Amino acid sequence: MPLTRKAYRAAILHSIADPAEVGIEASYEYFEDGLLVVDNGQISALGHASELLASLPANIEISHYQDALITPGFIDTHIHLPQTGMVGAYGEQLLDWLNTYTFPCESQFADRAHAEEVAEIFIKELLRNGTTTALVFGSVHPQSVNAFFEAAEKLDLRMIAGKVMMDRNAPDYLTDTAESSYLESKALIERWHGKGRLHYAVTPRFAPTSTPEQLTLAGQLLGEYPDLYMQTHISENLQEVEWVKELFPERKGYLDVYDHYQLLGERSVFAHGVHLCDDECARLAQTGSAVAFCPTSNLFLGSGLFNLPMAEKHKLNVGLGTDVGGGTSFSLLQTLNEAYKVMQLQGARLSPFKSLYLATLGGARALRLEERIGTLQPGTDADFLVLDYNATPLLSYRLKQSKSIAETLFVLMTLGDDRTVAQTYAAGNLVHQR
Ligand code: GUN
Ligand code: ZN
């Protein structure tokens, strides 16, 4: 195959470490006039344009951007494909919201054509917002995952998804059985896990909608294949936490239910964790599990404020999640805007470099994919964004006043959204252009 080589010249910024571990200054690299070189879908060089240009052949194709910032693609560690059509549903908190809006909307995925239509819309929306990797809940129907992976495969995206397992406490039209969920998940794993850049996640919805038999089989699946993911929800809402205590009185608490069924581990991602206690954070960290922080959802559903400093104290892996449709935006920039406010309400700070980390390298680490995505290090996949400083008149005017990359980054995260993403590249291919 002939070598395809291209270079991209602009201001370039990426996270290289967690600011909580190394301090802010050592957590990122910034090239005011940078160059990113891509060979066959992978990054082959990153540095100052003045230094790198001399080493490149004179005829190399270079895209040169003014008033723009290249960053790694964003990573959404928690989102629901079948809730695309119900973002912004009025008036309820979690359990009523599920019954009133979510389950009826997800039931439409029984229709294969509907699943395909929404999968196309969903993936376009991810890419328009600069999200190049997501950990995705399907519906209970296997065709939701087939439709999603078929659409993702066409664009050679790095994506993770799974069919929801739920065999109780949901309407009959939306439940599987312990056995059927095991068999259907297994068939999807055989078809998709490890194909190209796709990975499978075993997906029990949350403890209240699975019987002990189903949770046992979810744990069994994880043991049967290497590198499978596990995704579920935990401690999002106080009524939910109480309900889990009633359903599993023999367990110490919510996390202990998942622990008992062997669902914790290095590729396990628990959404929300708003009401986790100290011991639960310690146990999650000890097992290498991760939490998806979903601020727009936690505010919209009135769930509570995620305690990021507590997670940091335990060195718990944290990624960022939009949680669409409980969350109100596909944009991780808008998600960071709300994350900042969630910290403010707790008397804490969220530096723009920690925010960048959460949306990129932190998400990659939560998913154990930091060798492939989340940074612009040579040798990793060329999944990156071109962010436009002139995306809106206000952004343009505001950024002209900026005195540092820290200020520019913070304003991008406060005022930015899908309009800010001028181009999205995945595996070196242009997959979205505004
Ligand atoms: N808990 C169980 N299911 C869901 C869901 O679909 N969304 C959210 N936010 N929480 C859940
Ligand atoms: Zn969710």
Image (cartoon, grey):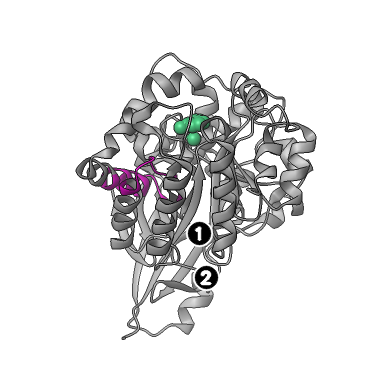
Toward the top, the furthest residue is 91
Label 2: few (<14), some (14–19) or many (≥20) C-alpha neighbours in 10 Å = many
Q: Was residue 203 drawn as part of the magenta stretch in this picture?
A: no
Real-space CA distance between mark 1 and mark 2, rounded to the nearest whole angstrom: 9 Å
Element assignment for label 2: strand
Magenta-drawn stretch contains 126:
yes
* Residue 289 spot, x, y in % from top left: 66, 49
Asked if marks 1 and 2 touch (Cβ < 8 Å), the reply is: yes
Report the residue that reaches farthest toward the left.
113
Quadrant containing the N terminus in the rendered view: bottom left
What residue do we see at 64% from left, 47% from top? 290
Question: Which residue is label 1 attached to?
Answer: 12
The three-letter amino acid code for the residue at tag 2 is Leu
Which mark identifies residue 185? none
Residue picked out by circle 2: 46
Residue 30 visible: yes
Which of the pair 53/352 is nearer the observer?
352
Q: Can you say whether 375 is above or below 411 in the image?
A: below
Q: Residues in magenta?
A: 119-143
Left/right of residue 420 with respect to residue 296 in the rendered view: left
Query: Between 37 and 401, which is closer to the camera in this rendering?
Result: 37
User: Which picture quadrant has residue 419?
Assistant: top left
Circle 1: is it few (<14), some (14-19), or many (20+) Cα within 10 Å? many
Q: Name the residue: 39% across, 56% down.
A: 66
The image position of residue 204, as x and y in percent, is: 51, 41
| SS at circle 1 | strand
Q: Percent x, y for residue 25?
A: 70, 53
The answer, for residue 391, to whether it is visible in the render is no
